[in-house]
Image (spheres, rainbow, N blue to C red):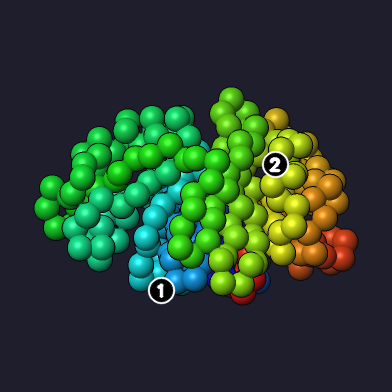
Amino acid sequence: MEVIFLGTGTSQGVPMIACDCGVCTSADPRNRRMRASIHVVMDGLHIQVDAAPEFRLQCLRENIRWIDLFILTHGHADHIAGMDDLRRYCDLLGGVALPVYSTDEGMGRVLAMFPYAIAERPISRGYAAFKLQEMPACIELPQGTIESTLLPHGGVNTLGLAFTERSSGKKFTYYTDCKRVPREAVSLAQGSDVVVLDGLRPDPHPSHMNVEEALAASVEIGAPTTYLTHITHLMEHADWASRLPAGVKFAYDGLRLTV
């Protein structure tokens, strides 16, 4: 299984607009954070999770050439705003609708923002078409399984996702944008080879885990490797990476993992 981090930043991105702090002006490319999303390749199946406002640029940078299905964790702008650029992948699929899985809230946001794309086929070549489906507890595929759980994130629930590849048996869990990891989500993540957790900033936040909360969740889950994502400009990569306990790392844009 391969995991590509297209973005690891927050809704404001890093560098932030009109900010001259040390992180926003850093020459270290790991401190340049587009809005958070990942691309998972599981036994040849290409799964895109979220589409940031920079989605097109991220796909060009990482040479993402194919998407079989799309999962929207929730309908906030930094995760949904790039979905119109999925139109190219509809072309590549031969003009059929791209399967899009989400929560009720997420599907409602897609309907509100992209009503022209809700169809069995694109209107014409070059248009998007989305086949909306509620994310089930488990999608069984020839390449493996994608399991889901709900994570609290302010006034909405986001999708937490666990991918298990059939050929290798490897398991990867992705929990972005959450204030805590409920007991059911801890159980789902246990046994993972790699876990990714929301680790927004040092100070508490009303709808995201801070670093301390993320580290506590990582201990509960007990994965051999944990990455933190959805990171603000308040944390310089090299400095904070050196403070993390063994087995916990900072993700960065362009990071590629073979799980």
Task: Tell me, yes or no, if residue 101 can be seen here.
Answer: yes
Classify mark 2: residues with Cα within 10 Å, few (<14), some (14-19) or many (20+). Answer: many
Q: x, y percentage for residue 163?
A: 58, 57
Q: Name which residue type carries label 1.
A: Asn
**Nearer-N-terminus badge (1/2):** 1
Question: Mark 1 to mark 2: distance in Å?
Answer: 32 Å
Q: Quadrant of the N terminus?
A: bottom right
- Residue at x-position 47% and y-position 40%: 135
Q: Is residue 224 above or below residue 203?
A: below
Left or right of residue 12: residue 187: right
Choose between 241 and 24: the one closer to the eye. 241
Q: Which residue is depicted at the point 38% across and 46% down?
A: 100
Q: In front here: 218 or 133?
A: 133
Q: Residue at x 56, y 72 (%)?
A: 167
Q: Secondary structure at mark 1?
A: loop
Q: Residue furthest left?
A: 124
Residue 120 lies, in percent from the top left, at 20, 45
Q: Which residue is mark 2?
A: 185
Mark 1 Cα within 10 Å, few/some/many (few <14, many 20+)?
few
Q: Quadrant of residue 94?
A: bottom left
Kindly identify which numbered label has been placed on residue 63.
1
